Structure formats: C-alpha cells, structure tokens
Image (spheres, helix red, strand yellow):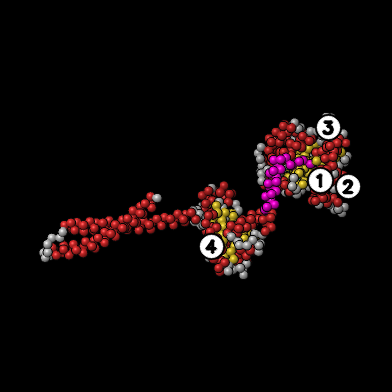
Amino acid sequence: MLRFGRAERDLIALGIAVSAILMFLGTGSSVLPQIARSWMGKGSAPDMLLVNALLLNIALIIFGWRRYAELTSEIAERRKAEERARELAETDPLTACLNRRSIGPATEALLTRAEERGEAVAFLMVDLDNFKLINDLNGHNCGDEVLRRTAERLRASLPEGGLLSRLGGDEFACAIGYDPRQPERADQIVCELIDAVAQPMKVDETPIEVTVSVGIAATIETLTDSEGKVDSARLMHKADIAMYHAKKRGRNGYSWYEPQLETDLRYRSELEAGIRRGVQNGEFVPYYEQQVDIASGELVGFEMLARWHSPDRGVVGPDIFIPVAEEIGLIAPLSEQLIGQAFDDALEWDPALTLSVNISPYQLRDPWFAQKILKLLVQHGFPAERLEIEITESCLHENIGLVFSMITSLRNQGVKISLDDFGTGYSSLSQLRALPFDRLKIDRSFVSELKDARGGTKLVNAIVSLGEGLDMPITAEGIEDAAILEALQKMGPLKGQGYHYGMPEDATSVHRRLTAMGRLVANAHDSDENDREAIGHEATEAALQRGRG
Ligand code: C2E
Ligand code: CA
Ligand code: CA
C-alpha cells in the first residue's frame, strides 16, 4: 500500500511537471521576448508577476522532472528485486538448480514443448545412496559440498534443455526431452549420469564415495497405461516408485517404472497397515513345534513359531510378516507380545518342557534387549532355566561385542542360547569358540539331504562332530520322515524337530496333546470347547503348510 501511495505521488509529480511545462510554454512565449527586449534596452521592464510565475514554472519543471527520473529508476530496481525474489523462490540456494516448487511447472512447460516437437519426455528421480553416512562421518559442510558437486555432475550429464532440480535433502530430479524413435537414448543418458556421479570425489582431501539410484518414467511408456494425459505430477510419482525399486535392487543403478511396481507397493503398504493393526489388536499368536530327543522319542520342549490370525488374510506365516515388522520397527513389540503369551501358555505345561523362541537380529541391536527379556520372565513368573533363545548367524555380523555381552548376561540368569539355522550363514570357527552358545541347530536344508540315501550324510556328520568338538549339543531341524530320523539316530545323541513329529500347533492343541500325555501341571484345566477350537486351528495350520509347499 505504502509503495503504491508513493507511486501515485510520483505520478502527481509527473503531472505537475507536465502542466508546469505547458504553463512555461504559455507564459514563457510572452515573458521571454519581453525580457530579451528589455535587456537589449529596446523595451520596458517585463511584468514582475509574469517573471515570478515563469521562475516558479522552471522550479516546478526541475522538481517534477527529477521526481520522474527517480520514479523510473525506482521501478527498474523494484522489477529487479521482484525478479530476484522469484528466482530465489524457484531455485535451490545450495546447488542453484530448480527446487521442489518449480520443477513441476518447468516440467509442464517441457512437456508442452516436447509435444509440439514430437519428442518424448523422461523424468528421472535421483537419490544419493549413502548420503546420511557421508554427513555423519564427515560433517554437514562436507555433505553440502557433496550435494553441490553432485548437482554439477548431474547438470553436466544432461542433454541440452534438460531440467535439474533438488527436491530436498539428497534427492534430485531431472526431466529430459528425447527422440521417441530412439527409446534407448533415455537409458543411455541415465547410465552416463550414474557413471558421472560415481567418479572419484575428494572433499578437503577426504575421498568420498558417492553413488545414486535412479527411477525413470517416460511419456512414451506411460501413455500405454490408458490414463489419458500424462502430467508432471503423475510422471514424478511414477519415477519415485521406480526409484524405490532401484534402491531395493541394490544401489548405484536404475529402474524403469512398471505398473506392477505400483501394485506391489500398494500390497506392501496394506500389509504394513495390517501388521500395525494386528499388533494393536493382538492378532499375532504363538504356535508350537515339538522338540524331541531322537533316541528315546521323548518330548523335551517346544519351539514357538509366530502366526498371524489376520481378519482379511487368514493364517499368515512368519516369512511374510517378520521381515516387514523388522523394517517398520515393530519386531520388538510384536516379539515381546508373543513371548509373553508363550510364557503364559508354557506355565501350564510340565515344567520339564523347555520353550524356545526366535529372536530377530534387529532385536539384538537394542542394548536393553537382555533386560527386556529378564523383565518379561519376572512379569510372567516364568523360570529362566526353561527358556532357550534362538539367534541366527546373521546376528553375529552386527556388533559382536554387544551380542557377546547380551548373551553373557542372559546366560548368567540361566537362559540358554542356541545358534539357529547353523551352516547357512558364515560364522567362523573362532566366533563359535568365542561365543558361549548352549546349542547348535543344524539347518533343515542339510538335514533334508539325508533323504537321499546315496549321500548327504557327510555334511551333517561333520556338523555333528563339530558340535561334539566344541562341546555344544545339537538339534536337527526339518525331520520330515522316518528315513531322515533313522539316519540321524545313527549319528549320536541329538534333539530333533520337524513335520515327522507333527505340524506346529496352537496353544489349545498343545494343551490337549499334553493333557493326553499327562504332562500338564496339576491344576491345569481343559475343556471340550478348547478341543473343538483346537481341531479348527490344526486344520488351518495344515492348510498354511500346504500353501507354502
Ligand atoms: P525356523 O526358526 O527355522 O523355524 C522352523 C521353520 O521350519 C518353521 O517355519 C517350521 O514350520 C518349519 N518346519 C518345521 N518342520 C519342518 C519340516 O519338517 N520340513 C520343512 N520344510 N519345514 C519345517 P515357520 O513357522 O514358517 O517359520 C519360519 C521362520 O520364521 C522361522 O524359521 C524363524 O526364523 C522365523 N520365525 C518364526 N517365529 C518367529 C518369531 O516369533 N520371531 C522371529 N524373529 N522369527 C520367527
Ligand atoms: Ca528357530
Ligand atoms: Ca531354524
């Protein structure tokens, strides 16, 4: 408002100057000749009133003209400032490329131009692979420099007319026009771009490794999925989906958008939402697999295996939901819920029966893990001596010192620790000797080879001798039939588990089984209703296993 008021005043000044000029012309035409004549001594003195009016006129003209000149320069400056503000609003200050706000309209303009010229447009979503690490290790100044140089490298690899934008953080986007008769051109540009970024880089003498993952969506392949007009928002969305896929496939590479990726993503996000709800609603339940002394056939304990009784999906196995729960950070609460339920169930069993639970490597990253387990034991009044924790070899690659101290503090309380899926990872013999495991579980992939009478025994035999040498008892997993059992029985005093002894079953079925064996604690109850429910669950478990096979 203030600025507008000033502009108005400036216009008035201009008006005054113009009218002063007109008046000057009017008065001046009669007064000036009079003055000239009087100076030359040819006429009488000019009328003083008119002379004063003329002088006033001149003053007004000078004032008006100066104001007008100021006004013009002010307007020019204002234009420049507005231009600069617009530039600032559209540019990323760190890298001087377009920003998130401006890439959309710029891409729209590119799309229109490309359509007129019969060109295709490819949109690339470019994400640095290890930027967080670069920042954490070398500081934010170095991070900023890496972003600037990456932007330079990207800019240099783009063909003429290509757009480059930093969307924020370590995420860039590019849009390029190309000849649709040469669809391989887009691939070529992306490969060059990925190579350019990956060239060696040094910031303050520190070598920095920079790579990017790229997702591409182009107007030509996008038109085929019958959505009508392609706009910049849709292109960006598709390139984004493709970029996530590129990241998942391994870094330093690129992926094209495919409709299937979007379907997968939707499935995945529904699965995540379902798991979140399931944890809240207690839909995850423990099932139990029998563990048996293979020489005597006596039941010695159970391994708890998680199942999801999903209202939409039915009974879901852990290979579907455990990895997702790990990724979305829900594995610890989920596992603690299950372990708590399993403690309550197992308190009704013969106290001689052990309970094994599987623990994810993610849980072992928590320095409070051992305390959490001990707290659960106390809360549920479950004896530590009956609990066995199964960890896989992959846990050993993480922070071995932390794992060691957790294992030690759990063992000090009486909990036993087994190394699960032994043989599938890469634990070294020195790790095995250093870490105080109570038991090795031979992975079922080795055990299943015992089916083949001609060979297959060598590896299992070797693992059994290793266990003997290290003084670690052994459990064989995946005993599917009598032939395998027989082969194992010849190898020594082992524990075993597998479908040969029955499918994993829910708490009610286990309760029923133990009732029949007379192996419940004295006051445990049983009812016909439980039995009926149990038969139902057994049927779903059988269906689940069939589905997997
Ligand atoms: P695992 O610890 O190796 O568990 C044994 C798996 O083998 C179970 O699959 C079991 O149903 C299956 N199995 C048992 N006997 C046989 C057999 O004779 N033949 C064959 N082919 N398979 C047999 P399940 O229940 O699908 O569990 C898969 C994996 O999920 C488990 O492998 C374990 O690593 C993980 N898991 C299960 N429950 C939990 C849990 O509560 N927490 C964590 N972190 N992982 C769990
Ligand atoms: Ca296990
Ligand atoms: Ca296993």
Q: Residues within 10 Å of mark 2 (few under 14, many from 20)?
A: few
Residue that label 2 marks: 482
Picture residue at 52% right of the left edge, 53% below the top: 145
Label 1's element? helix
Picture residue at 82% right of the left edge, 40% below the top: 533
The CA distance from mark 4 to mark 1 is 58 Å
The dominant secondary structure in magenta is: helix
Residue found at the very far top of the displayed protein: 523
The first of marks 1 and 2 along the sequence is 2
The first of marks 2 and 4 along the sequence is 4
Residue that label 4 marks: 109
For the residues labelled 2 and 4, say whether their Cβ atoms are less than 8 Å apart. Answer: no
Q: Quadrant of residue 258?
A: bottom right
The CA distance from mark 2 to mark 4 is 72 Å
The CA distance from mark 2 to mark 3 is 34 Å
Query: With respect to residue 118, does 489 lie above or below?
Result: above
Front-most of residues 173 and 495: 173
For the residues labelled 1 and 2, say whether their Cβ atoms are less than 8 Å apart. Answer: no
Residue 525 disc label: 3
Per the rendered image, the range of residues in magenta is: 265-291
The CA distance from mark 1 to mark 3 is 24 Å
Label 3's element? loop
Residue that label 1 marks: 541
